Image (tube, rainbow, N blue to C red):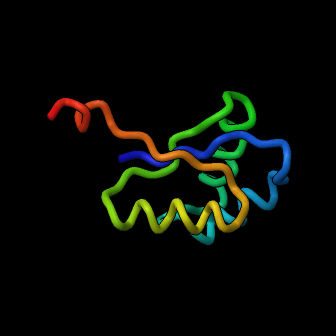
Amino acid sequence: MSLYLMNDEINSFEYVISTLCRLLPMCNTLQAEQIAILVHESGECHIYRGFPPNIYTIYAQLQKEGLTVKIKLDKNENSN
């Protein structure tokens, strides 16, 4: 499963960067800045890959902080 951050017109770059640094495992300021730019330019960016329940926990935390996130199944997960 993969977690994607979606673009919105609500949150500032600074807020998105600080939130990602706090809540995403192994995310530093440089990575969070790159994610914020990619989301702004393309509308979405892959930010995390994991398994339940961990991915659901991160998803819920990011939503609680006001970020727009979406969980998508990876291509190989659909072929069961």
Residue shown at 82%/53% (left/top)?
Answer: 11
Residue shown at 62%/36% (left/top)?
Answer: 44
Counting from the top left corner in percent of width and height, residue 66 is at: 73, 60
> Which residue is outermost to the left?
80
Counting from the top left corner in percent of width and height, residue 54 is at: 38, 66
Q: Nearer the viewer, residue 35 or 69?
A: 69
Counting from the top left corner in percent of width and height, residue 57 is at: 46, 68
Left or right, residue 33 beside residue 4: right
Q: Nearer the viewer, residue 42 or 74?
A: 74
User: Which of the image's four quarters has the C terminus?
Assistant: top left
Left or right, residue 36 beside residue 49: right
Left or right, residue 48 beside residue 65: left
70 to 63, vertically: above or below: above
Total of numbered circles in the picture?
0
Find residue 35 and report its image quarter: top right
69 to 56, vertically: above or below: above
Find residue 78 and report its image quarter: top left
Counting from the top left corner in percent of width and height, residue 7 is at: 72, 40
Residue shown at 64%/54% (left/top)?
Answer: 32
Find residue 15 and report its image quarter: bottom right
Left or right, residue 2 beside residue 41: left
Residue shown at 73%/30% (left/top)?
Answer: 41
